[in-house]
Image (cartoon, rainbow, N blue to C red):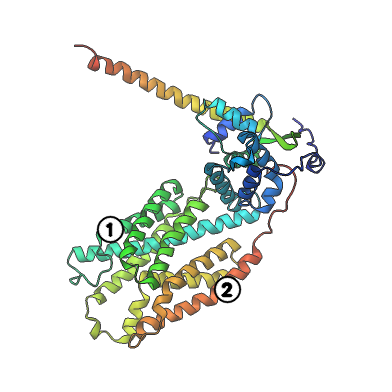
Amino acid sequence: MNVTEPMFLALTALVDEPRHGYGIVQEVERLSGGRVQLKIGSLYGVLDRLAGDGLVELDREEVWRGRLRRYYRLTDEGARVLEEEAARLAANAAAARSRLRARGLSARPAGGPA
Amino acid sequence: MTAPEPPSTERLEEFVSNAEPVLLERRYRAALRLLPASYRAEREEEMVAAFLEMSGDVPDERGPRPRWGEIASVAALAVRVRLGGAGARAAALGETVRLVALLGLGFQAMLGVHGLVWLAAMATGYLPSPDIATGADPFAAVADVLWVVAFTAAVRGSTGPAKPVAVAAAAVSLVLLGPAAHLTWTAAPAALMASVPVIALLAGFHGEAPVTVRPWRLVLLPMAVTLLVMAAVLPVALLPWAVLPEPLLAVSELVQPDAIATVACAVACAVALRRGWAPSARLALAAAATLLLAWRLPLAVPMPDAEFVWVPAAVLCAVLTAVIVPLVVTGRRLLPPARRAESGPAA
């Protein structure tokens, strides 16, 4: 399955504990260093997809300050998919770093002082 | 792992505040009306709660409104839910929109091949009279190529690249319509024919839509038919109109790519009705037939001494009208029922 960055970050946000909608938005923003700021419509698009694929599920419902909060948790399948995706991204990052290092070494004689 | 049973929403909603909603909440709930009622029944309260938590307390006196980005995200969610969200009905409607996109792009690709062949025939001197050719504008050739590329990419499952190419093709086609805008009878259907497939492509092939790689023969068939017909028609185009007998002129009107597409669509509509095709195919064909009807209608207006033009067009329009209505009626009736509102997540 194609795991987009918001999906990846939302799954990561649920690894340590179940979170409700706005809690996921906050955690995704924190995890991405402020780069990914999910809109509410986008968040529920992501949650629909993850729940539809069985990667997250409803944990509990609470009423907070008179409003309904639904908490979502990562399923075992969600953890497995996240692990696979993390490994894939890590392999890509390692390949990129390795090639950049090689490029830096080979470029040094040409770009260095004569 | 056994999931704990969540408490029932009905019971919890008794504790949800029923105080007068603040202005921002009312405005956000108004934006949420873009979503289907069944989806709102499941999600509205938690979406409102998340939105208000994110926005903080904003007094009504400041006239707060949800940001455009928030409204756009709700609109995008509404498109996704309606055209591919949970439920068989949404999936069928999504498939309908995707088929409309492919049929519309296929039509434009046929016109594109036609225009490019005309241009090539003129460039090589095969067609001596430049006023015969309609695809003489080099910008039209750009649009022709873009339509063919967009159709090929969409059919082969590369809908990501197909989208910007189709948008560019539609933009060029619409700009080219500008000088002909005074011809409102033909410009309006042409503008519809250029824009509807692209809108359907953008809306139907969203992130959650299934990726389908369709066979090459679906790409090649419309183009091959256009080329074959043109191989037969181009020699006739060299003859002066005056020497052609009227029956031959009428036939030549019917072997234009748009007329072939109309005939093919009418046949497909009849087959869909007879063989009991899926509701998505019926509704998509009805939409395509409606667009083609709008396209052909200006030609079906009776004109003196031009029966060879308007009579075939009128016959095709009558056939299309006859099949559109039963396709829409049966297609709608056969659509799976809308998802009933349930408590809990939309999983």
Residue B91 position (above or below residue B208): below
Residue B74 is at least partly visible in this image: yes
Foreground pick, B205 / B210: B205
What residue is at 49 percent from the left and 66 percent from the top?
Answer: B288
Tell me the amino acid under the disc marked 2. Val
Instruction: Residue B41 in the image: state x and y as whole percent.
Output: 71, 49
Instruction: Residue B314 in the image: state x and y as whole percent.
Output: 44, 81
Foreground pick, A58 / B123: A58
Q: Chain of mark 1?
A: B
> What residue is disc 2 on?
B325
Tell me whether circle 1 and circle 2 mark residues in contact (CB < 8 Å): no
Residue A40: assigned label: none
> What residue is disc 1 on?
B139
Instruction: Residue A63 in the image: state x and y as whole percent.
Output: 76, 35
Q: Tell me the quadrant of the picture where the C terminus of chain B can be found.
A: top right
Q: Tell me the quadrant of the picture where the N terminus of chain B can be found.
A: top right
Label 1 element class? helix
Instruction: Residue B47 in the image: state x and y as whole percent.
Output: 66, 41
For marks 1 and 2, give the one nearer the viewer.
Answer: 1
Residue B10 position (above or below residue A59): below
Tell me the amino acid under the disc marked 1. Phe
